[in-house]
Amino acid sequence: MNEQISQSDINQAGHLTIGGCDAVELANEFGTPLVVYDVNKIKSQIEHFQEVFKNNDVDYAVCYASKAFANTAMYQLVDSMNCHIDVVSAGEMSMALHAGFPASKMTFHGNNKSLAELQMAVDNGIGVIALDNFHEIDLLEQVLAKSNAEIEVMLRITPGISAHTHEYIQTGQVDSKFGFDLESGEAERALQTVLKHSRMHLIGIHAHIGSQIFELNGFEMAANKLVELAADWKQRFNYQAKVIDVGGGFGIRYTDEDKPLKPEQFVDTIIKTIKQASQDHGLDTPAVWIEPGRSIVGPAGYNLYTIGSRKDVEGIRSYVSVDGGMGDNIRPALYDAKYEAVVANRPADEIVEHVHIAGKYCESGDILIQDQPLPKTQPGDVLVMLDTGAYGYAMASNYNLNPKPAIVFVDNGKATLVTRRETPADLERLDYGLDGK
Ligand SMILES: *Cc1c(COP(=O)(O)O)cnc(C)c1O
């Protein structure tokens, strides 16, 4: 049996349960492919983060990086948990506002925010803009002047730290599209520019060194660098950073090759590093902000599929196909991301073979899992892919004009449809046809 599953996850019918709900019944009731989130897992990870801050007695914000997974229910859930959020587009801002999420607890990120997006942020009283480049500072100044408004900002710094992770998801090294470079003096020029703009109130400094990081070391280095920078700016510009935001990137377990620390252990080390370094430099301890995305939603998410056709390539391998694939989870095709799966209606059956789990999309690269150990399966079985909650539905597409799946939140045995499945009509809703409008 998969080591992520325990006997208590299997009910009397011999089916896998998710958040107290029978996974086979979920598939029957809501159809497949289906995205399921266990609400308790989301809540408890947020609580673990919050506890570690309280135990270390620092001011803090847990800012959920909503690009990892956003829908109206998720914004409402994280609001109920007293989180802040990161948003990176007008779309995320708009959905969060629509969900009733307080604008004051949003941080707006991105390396190419448009004038319209900045205007929207200012008009709606978004809490903090994480400034990324000089062009954006100019645009924001224009918006603020025109609107006679003021806003809090942070400076996103590229600290020149390369975290050990897949290269497509590194953002902290010098060669990055994000942020003001530290070594070249760009960051310092950004500070001087922002301090001249009286409508921008600089609350602190930000760095995000990458994603799916397993080593503490990169975070310690980044935390130390940010405090050193704060100390330098205090001394030379009499600027006192109130917030140090270390971003997210805490690695999670996808397969038994991953051996991550608990996400809150990363945060514990980061906080202690910042406290110590602040003390060493004679600074007041700043508030510490974190921006976890994957670690909050990744392990809480499950993708359910129905098994269909099978192809046995004599002497080479077998392909077992499911009714979803790269349209609902592009990470295996995009990043060579690895996952594990369990057959929901026979989770404890003896493993008899290793097969490739193939998606239904017209790309040879649409293989969700390579060499997945499986019991004997047949068409109609329900396959559950584990840990799919981050950057799965968030990156979903309509490739091959497949509709996006429905999303169900399960909470202590209760299943709630929070996003409906797309229909062919949804796919046609933007089209005027050959005759145009
Ligand atoms: C993507 C991103 C995050 C979240 O990263 P995870 O790996 O999902 O924790 C946090 N902060 C910023 C600025 C990001 O771009």
Image (spheres, rainbow, N blue to C red):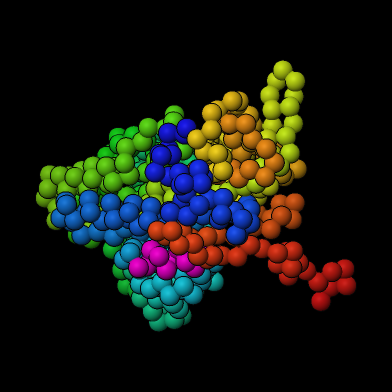
Residue ranking furthest to the front? 12
Q: Horizontal placement of 163 versus 378: left or right? A: left
Left or right, 260 with reference to 176: left
Residue 77 counted in the magenta span: yes
Picture quadrant where residue 53 is located? bottom left
The residue nearer to you, when weighing 43 against 243, is 43
240 up-or-down from 246: above or below: below
> Residue at left 49%, top 68%?
72
> Left of 219 or right of it: where is 238?
left
Total tally of numbered discs in the picture? 0
Residue stretch in magenta = 71-80
Rendered residue at 43%/54% (across/down): 20
Rendered location of residue 43, percent (x, y): 35, 57
In the picture, residue 3 is in which quadrant?
top left
Q: Assign the C terminus to one quadrant of the image.
A: bottom right
Question: In the picture shown, does residue 291 fall above or below 252?
Answer: below
* Residue at the image point whose x is 50% and y is 35% from the top: 348
